[in-house]
Image (cartoon, helix red, strand yellow):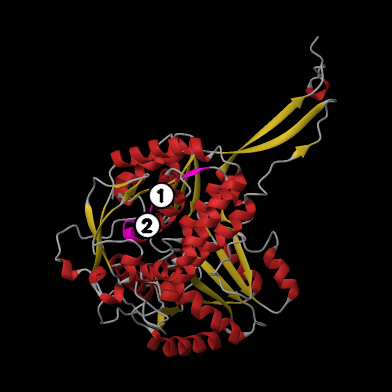
Amino acid sequence: MTLLTRILPLTRTPFFIARAMSSSGYLINEPKYAFLKDLGLEESNKGVFNGKWFANGEVVTSMCPANNRPIAQVQQGTVEDLDACVKAGKEAWQVWADMPAPARGEIVRQIGVALRENLEPLGKLVALEMGKIKPEGIGEVQEYVDICDFAVGLSRMVGGSVLPSERPGHALLENWNPLGIVGVITAFNFPVAVYGWNSAIAMVCGNTLLWKGAPTTPLVSVATTKIVASVLEKNNLPGAVSALCCGGADVGTAIAKDERIPLVSFTGSTNVGKQVSLMVQERFGRHLLELGGNNAIIVDEDADIEMVVRAALFACVGTAGQRCTTTRRLILHEKVHDEIVERLVKAYKSFMPRLGDPLDDGVLYGPMHSQQGIDGYLATIKEAVSLGGKVEFGGNVIDREGFFVEPTIVTGLPHDSPVVHRETFAPIVYALKCPSLDTGIQWNNEVNQGLSSSLFTQNLGNVFKWLGPKGSDCGIINVNIPTNGAEIGGAFGGEKHTGGGRESGSDAWKQYMRRSTCTINYTKELPLAQGIKFE
């Protein structure tokens, strides 16, 4: 497989059908899906925006993972279309960077209001095109709303430092300025929220945006951009402040290699993220990586078992195992291992009637996003069994329309089994029997990724051991909550092969700006630092 075919988000052929279809076959024309037209979508949509909508690339059909039916078409962009977006983004930056940060914050506030007004229809589109259940789709849009609120406050707080100078009559300052265009490449599993984390913060920092969404969720990208563009137009601002170029591997590679894009934020697999980072680094650009996670919940012998089972159910099967923070490993103290596995199997069984169409009320478990996900699910289960694993629950593709699989629990494997150490983006969890908390921490840290981790315990001393220098080596370290469901107020990201990037809250804004150390002499004297005499 070449690099060009691996630049995420990958093209998944079952979802990408570039062919003519009769109008009656599209979901957008059916009354149940009227919300699509409320978002400004049509049967055929242009997938490039730089102040105007256009496209010159392949026409693709977005398919619904719950029923394998076509939703609508999007015409992708080309590398030449991307170039037009970059040029327009640079021109827009001349206007945007001159605006005071609080004025930019006001625009982001209005974007948050517009998203609130479209919360349900956009959330339903996420459920329809990605496959996550409707409450999760709406919750994902709410994340974009929340980060807009955060960014509004940030727009009045971004600031440098005034430092003491060793030289008389001198001021020593740190000053922060925007980078220019920020390229954002997002994955299918969070087609709105991750762009929101990047765009809201980058915008108040004075940057313009160029977004390449996942090829398998182009309608979400178009609809979200239409909402943002409406706010920019209402304020007589250039649309290219928030540009979009849907496309395939050629567009992703061009973004990574373009020297006019000083920062590339990439969300996707570790393997592809490494290739993107090398291309960006080759031109001495910046990259912000949010990559894979082989996340573990450690359960100590004194943990609240009922709480563990409830938390693990959502952490393991929520979004059909397609969150980067999904729990992949349950590291269970040997005294509670059997009880937790038994109770979790019962919870899985009682959960299965809640499987169905993600748009239907009461459904808690939707489909995998694509056939590629099912293929990975089946291959991993086959490998796990061949290595001595026992399937306690699940392990099968469900015989119904769409890409549905059974959430799966596997026991009996060593903690360092190769299949356990490899992240599979599917609802598979390995229950591992562990003799002690110290050993559990070692197992948590032995995988390449370092995104999210959680410890369930009632021991205060163990809490601080877990949080300390010899505890979890992940970017997200939780206690008595699952590995998924992070809040926007904290910086989101991980260590090691997860990439080291940080998005969303805290001081993640610093990644979208350049820092200058400034020394100002306000006297007629010219002393040198360190007392050096040059006379």
Quadrant where the image shows the C terminus: top right
Q: Which residue is mark 1?
A: 211
SS for callout 1: strand
Number of marks present in the image shown:
2
Q: Which mark is residue 150?
A: none
Residue that lies at the very extreme toward the right in this rendered image: 168
Amino acid found under the numbered disc labelled 2: Ser
Please determine whether, in this image, residue 215 is positioned above or below residue 431: above
Instruction: Give the quadrant of residue 148.
Output: bottom right
Q: Are marks 1 and 2 in contact (CB under 8 Å)?
A: yes
Q: Position of residue 153 (x, y in %)?
A: 64, 55
Asked whether 208 falls inside the magenta stretch, the response is: yes
User: Is 368 or 309 nearer to us in this picture?
Assistant: 368
Q: Position of residue 499 (x, y in %)?
A: 51, 52
User: Is 56 or 312 nearer to us in this picture?
Assistant: 56
Instruction: Give the quadrant of residue 332.
Output: bottom right
Mark pair 1, 2: CA separation: 8 Å
Q: Which residue is mark 2?
A: 221
For disc 1, the neighbor class at 10 Å (few under 14, some 14 to 19, many from 20) is many
- Residue at image location 71% in from the left, 72% down from the top: 462
Residue 285 in view, yes or no = no
Boundaries of the magenta span: 207-219
SS for callout 2: helix
